[in-house]
Every structure is written in structure tokens, then in C-alpha cells.
Image (cartoon, grey):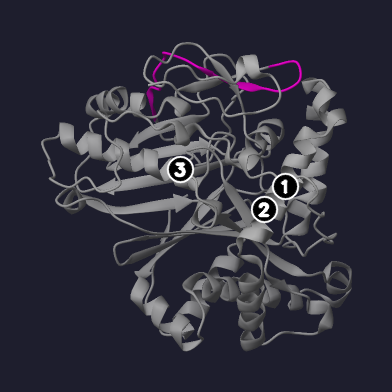
Amino acid sequence: MKIKDESLQQEKDDEDIDDAKSLIKEKYRLDVAGKLFTYVSSPRIPTVYRFWVSLKELVNVDDLQKAVDNIIGRFPYYQVQLSRGFLWHKWKTTTEIPQITHETDYPLQYIPIKEPNTFPYRIIASYNKIIVEFNHCLTDGVGALTFLKALTAEYLTLKGFVTNDWGDIFRPNQTPLAEEFEYSYRKNFKIGIPKIGKVYRAFHLPFEKEKLGVTYVISGKMNVNDVLENSKKWQVTLTEFLTAVYIEALQEIMFEMPKKQLKRKKRPIRIMIPINARKLIPSKTMRNFTMFIAPGIDPRLGEFSFKEIIEQVHHYKNLHINEKYLVQIISNYVAMEVNPFVHATPSFLKSWFVKPIYRKTGEALFSAFLTNLGRTSMPIPLNEEVLGIQLLPMNHPYFKSSCALLTYFDDLYINFARSIKESVVEEKFFNKLRYFGIEIKINESF
């Protein structure tokens, strides 16, 4: 099947993908998020996140590798490696196949994407878990979860389990759609869109970061209906309710600081929340297509009650989650990419100034990170072999605290990743949920 050209104006000779099945060696540009994360990615800022499936039985590595061999052709846009260019890095398709690896001491380890023959993700077999870790330069949570579910379904098929209804699960015998390759940021870029107003630095946790490569994880499992019941009482969504809980926990930590430290560090508290743009702007892309919003409070105005926090979060979210605002963010990002000066700057020089800009205009503006992938499932009877599906967010060393939500049938998994020893954020967060009558099973993985 011929894949249509993405209609990009620059470097057309490298941007055509001739045939999704043949996987001949072609190069095509990274999306704007992919470019950012490629330049930023380092042992200090790995830009890696993790999904995993827990099965009833131990994972057979040989069978899992065979499942990878079978399913990878359905994801030609993930059978790629980074090709370092003079102006921009590109994706180069390859006939190589990712190999199963083993669990490391800590999750979310740096993937050396710029080294030869390196995939921008890893597939891990660990006891009864099938794990995928993706560098965000390749895709967002939607793409990674789609890949993991397809891989798990193929693995269970090899183990003898079958289903009559695959639902939204990608299968090896399917032909990839042209739209799955789409560079959706560029497609929805509009010229003349005004810039977003300046945002000032946010509050950050007053704790020392751990050494490189250390990520601590605390997980909470609960019945999603208990959380939804509380959300309905406050007349907000589940994400809004849990964001407010997160903000209140951070506010408590702020006001518990000594007076001199509080005076120096009292700044707005903002939670960075990714938004799946596909829900508002039609797209089937399996590449990055995520925007973000940043609800929060300004404690310089005084201490906020939970009612005030939840109102701030709710109205901010309603004001900003719409197509026009997302297009404004998209256009602001892509405008930097198409800027003639930025485009003409050699790639090695871009790597010098992108990381400081990322710190100043990215992580410095947010206090923490929360992502919600919503509810997911597996087809019957495959679901009987799957105990749960979970997400661990990127470990943002500047935020020091990140949270991910994923619901498998009625089980809500809340996973925190942090780069500090202190677990005070998680303790306050889960204690607040218990205050609302929610029963939680806590697990500290690393």
C-alpha cells in the first residue's frame, strides 16, 4: 500500500514513505515533540515512560520475542532508529527487530537513542510482566499503549488463547493506514495565531534530587467507582478531582516549610496535564499528538481550601480544553520549528540551546506532572489472563514528582515516579483519598 506524502514543505526527498509493508530504508522527519525530546534526552532527563501488563502466568521470553517478530510489521513507524542529520534528526526505517531485554535496578532508564542500531524504546520481560518503555521522541501514551496491547494479544494468541472480537487491538495481518504515519502537529499548524501569554516560574519541591538513574515508584490500586463517586459529589471529572488532591498535597508541603524558605520558594503551584489532542482534532496518528494544560493555584494570595482548589481546576480545564486553544498551542510549537533561523541552525548547535530553553520554558513552569490515559481493557477471553495494565510517567527531575492514572476495567492504578528520597507527596496524596473514604492498596516497587 502506498503511503501518501505528509505534504511538508521542507526536505521532501526524505519525507516520503513508499510502502508500509516493505519497510525499505526511508527517512522521514520527527514531529515537533519528537525533535524536542531528542535534543533534551540525556541520562539526567531520560524522557522515558513505561507501560506494563501483569499476567497470571510467568512470561516466556521466547514466545514474547516471537510475538514481537509477528507484530512489529503492523507498526512500521516504530520499526525505526534515529538518523542524525545536519539540520534535523530523522527517523530511518530498518529491517531489524527489537530484542527482549531484562529488568534493570530502576525503571525509566535512559535510552541512548543517538547510538547506532538503537530503537527508541525497549521491551522487557520480568516475571509475569510484559513491559514497554518508550522515549517520548517516538510517540505519546496513546501510541505506546496501542503497541503494548497488540503485543500482549499476540503473545496470548501464541499461548493458545483466541477471541472472536479483537475490538481496537491491532493485529499482524492488518495493513497500516496512511493516517497512522501522519504528522498531525504540522497538519493542524496555522499561520498568524497569537502567542500564548508569558507564564512565570512555579513552585518546586524543596528536596534534593537523587543520583542519576534513580527513580522511586509508589503505586496505589483502588476501585475507580469509589473515586468517581467522590468526583460526582464535587461535580467534577475524575482527573479534576485527583488533580485538586495533588495540588492540595503540594500546597501543604509548601506551607510546612520554614518561614525563610517559604518566603523564597512561595510561587504558583501548577500541574502539567497532557491532553490527547486526537479527542478534539480528528487524527489516527501513532506518532506524538499530545498538548497540555496547567491548572493550579497561586498561594501568594493565601492558602486555598480544597473547595477553592477544585473550583480553580475545574474552570481552568473547561476554559482551555477546546479545539481553538489546542490549535493555538500547536501553532506556537510548530512556529518555532519552521522559524527560518532555527531551521538553518546546524543540529549540533540546536542541541546546545534547546535543553536550557526546555528547562526555562518547560519544566520550570510546572510543579508536578499528572497524566490520565483513561479506561482500557482487553478482549474476552484474553482479559481473564491479564491482571492489570499500568502506566509509569516520565521521571521529571526538575518536577521531582510525576503521577500517572490508568484504569483497567474497574481497577484504577495511580503510579508515582519521583527523583527524591522523600515520599511525602505520595503519603499526603493517598491519605487524602482515604479521608474521602477510598480504600487503597499501596505497593512500593522500587
Give the residue drawn at x 70%, y 75%. 251
Number of labels in the image equals 3
Q: Is residue 92 magenta?
A: yes
Q: Quadrant of residue 297?
A: bottom right
Q: Earlier in the sequence, mark 3 or mark 1?
A: 3
Q: Which mark is residue 331?
A: 1
Spatial CA distance of label 3 from label 1 is: 19 Å
Tell me if mark 3 has few (under 14), some (14-19) or many (20+) residues whose alpha carbon lies within 10 angstroms of its own: some
**Residue drawn at the location 62% of the way across and 22% of the way down:** 90
- Residue interval drawn in magenta: 85-101
Can you give x and y, in whole percent of width and height, for residue 273 in the image? Answer: 60, 60
The amino acid type of the residue labelled 3 equals Lys
Disc 1, SS: helix
SS assignment at label 2? helix
- Residue 327's label in the rendered image is 2
Residue 280 in picture, x, y percent from top left:
53, 57
What x and y, as percent, mark residue 307? 62, 88
Please tell me in which quadrant of the rendered image residue 14 appears. top right
Query: Residue at the spot x=56%, y=45% of the render?
Result: 289
Assess whether residue 12 is covered by the magenta stretch.
Answer: no
Q: Position of residue 6 (x, y in %)?
A: 57, 29
**Which of these two is toward me, 354 or 387?**
354
**How far apart, in angstroms, are the residues tagged by discs 3 and 2?**
17 Å
Q: Are marks 1 and 2 in contact (CB under 8 Å)?
A: yes
Residue at 63% from the left image edge and 45% from the top image edge: 188
Which quadrant of the figure contains the N terminus?
A: top left
> Of the numbered discs in the image, which one, if any, rests on residue 284?
3
**Pointer 1 local density, CA inside 10 Å: few below 14, some 14–19, many at least 20:** many
Q: Closer to the camera, 292 or 179?
A: 179
Q: Nearer the viewer, residue 237 or 184?
A: 184
